Every structure is written in structure tokens, then in C-alpha cells.
Amino acid sequence: MENEKLKAAIEAVLFTMGDSVEISHLAAALNTEPEKIRELLKEMKERYEEEDRGIRLLELESAYQLCTKTEYYDYLIRIAKQPKKYVLTEVLLETLSIVAYKQPVTRLEIEKIRGVKCDHAVNKLIEYGLIEEVGRLDAPGRPLLFGTTEDFLRSFGVSSTEDLPRISPEQIEDFKEEAEEEIQQKIHKK
Amino acid sequence: MENEKLKAAIEAVLFTMGDSVEISHLAAALNTEPEKIRELLKEMKERYEEEDRGIRLLELESAYQLCTKTEYYDYLIRIAKQPKKYVLTEVLLETLSIVAYKQPVTRLEIEKIRGVKCDHAVNKLIEYGLIEEVGRLDAPGRPLLFGTTEDFLRSFGVSSTEDLPRISPEQIEDFKEEAEEEIQQKIHKK
Amino acid sequence: MGIPVKLPVFEGPLDLLLHLIESNKIDIYDIPIVMITDQYMEYIRTMETRDLNTMSEFLVMAATLLEIKAKLLLPAEVDEEGEEIDPRAELAERLLEYKMYKYMAYELKDRQSLAARALYKEATIPDEVASYIEPVDLEELVGDLTLQKLNEIFKSILRRQEDKIDPVRSKFGDIEKEEVSLEDKMSSVETYLKGHRRFSFRNLLEQEAKKSRLHVIVTFLAVLELMKTGRLTVQQEETFGEILIEAKEPRE
């Protein structure tokens, strides 16, 4: 096979494999001397360095691999990573409000108040940097305690959690008295 | 960004993703007009056709994908894994050709042409990812409409359904003489 | 290359018809209906399929052929332009259309075997790209959310929780789920049944009432369950009268 064709065949193999391929394997598949293959690869390597190429040939001991040029990673990120739309869903908002008003609070307490599992919501809020681990409760299993972050305060324009609007006595009045007791009981039992 | 860099970025993205990438995605990631991207891809396509290249650019409707040139298959297969193959029976091929040429098409239309039930064939083709539901016909019962997928284009080496082979005059020669006249009539009536 | 002649297994009535037409070397537009109908009928008589669906498809075509045969014996109908309508025309059109798709199917097959010689590449996302995490823009995230709103949300949760609390049930205190299981109760009632055969429902509950209210409830449920499975029957002579539980003989 002539050199041009051999180079094309090498490119085809390296492309399909994605991973590194031993020169000896290439030589066997193409029925060509390894020395010849190595020489062609050197030539190809130079071609790939040209400006309009987004891939390059990586030399690894006795193997070669095609890979993406690092300078184009930024564009890859835009394509490979779906631009995430961060939104505070209702579930997240509810969880956040509980953490804000009951902090420091455990996962279990949040779950008791919301009546549903909250692992996902808590993790998401941590990912967003709105809440964080603030310690562990001195109770069996030593559960994690969560509180709001400084970033949380900053984005809400308050300087401390003390500044969070409290529930006023009048508002509490609106709650059925007997139910309130129940709630208090439930929350403080922990 | 200058053209050379844009081309390199496109190559980097197509290489990394392996799969087909929509022109619109490329345009968004590269902050460039889709028309410009399309133009660059056309230029790149030509470059890939050069003798020493083992890969080529495949156009699939509004997307592009890199793949190896078919002439290197025999070498490739000595190193690379054989991609999974499905066998298309005659029934499946007939059904597929009806969907390909008549799309969007309902089950009933396919059955009318073939004179037999086609549920099984249609389901199998959907399972193979060669056809898909593309909508519903605005008719009583709102029957489903089927069309071919991008995977169909890839598997049959066509860029768009427009590119599907038509019956050429030479091919018609091969038809039995007595049928010839009628077929001509049929095609030109279209 | 033409359409290869297959083994005498046909995909459908059109396939069979096309085969007969081709093997007889006749013009699709001038089908000798009598001859073709005879051959067609001959074939379906020898068909081995017991599948009614497949068979019916072939029979529909047989009926069409016989209808055409009959029409050919009658004086020809004419269309709006006064031209004679060939009763075979519609069938010929169908056959040609089918033939065209069949031919295209072979074309596609050739294309496919060529296209299968191109190989693709799996995605190879560099670690740096894969591990990239988009920074969260808190300002955008928080948007027009205010503390006041957060406060409203918190209160609504508390209110909702209050709605959930059933005033009756809440008086029981916590119901310990593990304490009394229905399965256990069912087997203890069944054991009791073996020893007593017939007993008062009230007595049974009175014993349970010594334990707890929950025991009474679960025992009641167990009795219902055993009634459903046919292990016992319940009788009551008059309204508010004594309820008697009686064991039923096992089914065998």
C-alpha cells in the first residue's frame, strides 16, 4: 500500500479506537513494518499540528492515540455539558426556608416537616452554595446539621440569620392552637 | 474567531463527541452564524476527501458526524470491534422502503401497499431505531405517522431522505422488458 | 439484476401475485385474469399455514381476483371521458407500486452493506471537560426571591403540616408500627379458632382490649382478613346482637 493510503488507514484505525493503539498492532493490521508505521506517524503528527486541525497525535511509548487539542476544551464544554439552568424549584424553596428558619437542622427534621424525603433537595442546595454542613447533632448516629451559608445571606441582603423575618405572634395566632402544640411537640421531641 | 480556528474547533468537537452534532449546536458553542458553520463544514468535507485521510465528514440532515472511510473497513476490522449488526429481513426492508419513500406514512398506508399486516415489521423497525413516530394524521382515529430516523440515514449512507436512490434508467433496463413501459410511466407520472 | 425468484414462501398476496406474473412472463397491465386466478387459487390451496390472519390476507386477494374475473364477463364500464374502464387497472397499479418498493428494498440493502463499512467513534470526553462544573450564579438563582417570600413559604409549610394532623389520631400519640402486626394477629386468631371453633367476637375483643387499643384494631382487621380468605364465618342473629365467629373447615 502506498504511503498516503497507509496514513489514511492509520488515521481510520486511531479514530475508531479512540484509545491508544500499539504500533505493533497497527503494523500487523496493515501488513507493514513497524518502523515504517512509526515513520508515517511522525509525519502525520506534524500535519495534525496545523492550525485548522482540532485533534492531535499523542505519542505514548510504543503506542499512538488521537486526542482533542486542549485549546478547544472550552467549546467542548459548551457542547458536551448541557448548559445547566439552575432554578429554585418549589421543593428547593421549601427546603431552603426550613433550613433558614430552623437552623441548625438535620435531614430528618426537614423530612418530618415536609413529610417527604429531602436528600435530593438538600444536596442541590449544598451544590448551589445556599446551605452547608454546620456540625453534627449530639444524638444517636450523629446526624449532620445544616445551616445557611454566608452566600445565602449576601444574596438575600441580610447580615445575619438573626435578621431573617420571624413569624410574628399574631401570625402564630392564626394557626390553630391545638395544632401548634402538636407541631412544637413533634419538632422539639428530637 | 478566524476560519482556521473555527474549523479546528469544529473538528475537535466532532472528534470528541463521536456522535452527530447539530449545526445549530456548533453555531451556538462557537458563537458563529449557522450559515458560516455550514460553509466551513463544506470546506472541511472536501479536505477530508484527500488521499491521506482515513476519516470523512458525514452529513445527516442538519447534523454532521465523523466516520471512517469505507475503503479501510478491512484493515479496521482486524483491530476494531465489529459493530453490532441487525439483519433486516425482506419484510422489514420492504416496510422500511415504504416508510423511507412515502414518509410521513401511517400503518394503514403501508398495509395497503404491501397487502399484509405490518404491525410486527413497524415495531421491529422502531426497535432498531430506523423509524420513529413523527406525529399523527389529522384524520379519524388520529393514526400515528412514521418517518425515518437519523440512524436510518447513517445506516444506509444517505445524507437526507432526498438523497435516497431513485430508479435510474439503467436500473430500469434490468427490469423485465414487459414491465418496462409501465414502470417508466409510473415514475414520470410522479 | 431483476427481482430474484424466492423460495415459494411469499410475504403476502401481492408478493405471490407478482411472482406468478413474472414466472408466466406476462404484462402487468394485461393480466390474463382467468389463468392467474387459477394459479393463485392453486397456490393458496397448497398453503400450509394454519395462521388465520395470514390466510385471510391471501383470501382477500382471491376475492379481488374473482371479482375482476366476473367484471370482465360483463360489458365494460366507461369513465367520465367515455373510455372503457379496465377492471384490472387498479390491481395493476397496486402491483406496480408494490414492485417499485420491493425493488427499492433491494437498493436499500445494497446501500446498507456499503454503509456498514464505515465505523464510528465512541465519545471520548477529556476528564477536564467531564469534570467541569458550571459555577452557580447565585444572583441569578435567587432572582426576585425575597426573604419575605421565603418566610411565606415557611409559614405555608407549617400550615400544611397542621392540616395533615388528624385531631383524633393525634390524641393516640404515636402509633408504633412494629408493635402489632396483622400477620401475627391473624395467626394468633387462627390458633384461637383451632381451640374454640365457635366463639363470641366481643369476648375476643375484650381480651385484646386489655393489651391496647391498637390490639383491638388489628384483631378486628385480622378477623376481616380471615373472613375474606374463608377461614371463618361470622353470624349475627339480630342488630346489635352477639356476633359469633365460627371456624370453617379447610377447603380440602
Image (spheres, coloured by chain):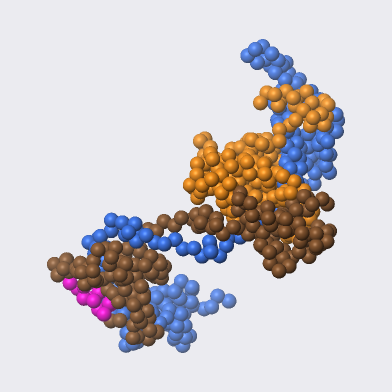
Chain colours: A brown, B orange, C blue
Q: Is C75 a magenta residue? A: no
- Towards the viewer: C8 or C194: C8
Location of residue C188 in the rendering, given as x and y in whole percent from the top left corner = 44, 85
Residue extending furthest toward the left: A170
Q: Is residue C30 left or right of residue A145?
A: right
Specify start and end residues of the magenta stretch as a single range.
A177-188
Q: What residue sits 28% from the left and 56% below the top?
A: C144
Which secondary structure class fits the magenta region best? helix
Q: What residue sits 76% from the left and 57% below the top?
A: A40
Location of residue C143 in the rendering, given as x and y in whole percent from the top left corner = 31, 56
Location of residue B9 in the rendering, given as x and y in whole percent from the top left corner = 56, 51
Location of residue B146 in the rendering, given as x and y in whole percent from the top left corner = 59, 42
Residue extending furthest toward the top: C82
Task: Report the number of discs.
Answer: 0
Q: Which of the 4 image quadrants contains residue A86?
A: bottom left
Q: Is A179 a magenta residue? A: yes
Residue A5 versus residue C67 in the image, above or below: below
Quarter of the image for the C terminus of chain B: give it.
top right
Q: What residue sits 32% from the left and 67% below the top?
A: A151
Q: Is residue C145 left or right of residue C194?
A: left
Specify whether residue B81 is in view. yes
Residue C51 versus residue A119 in the image, above or below: above
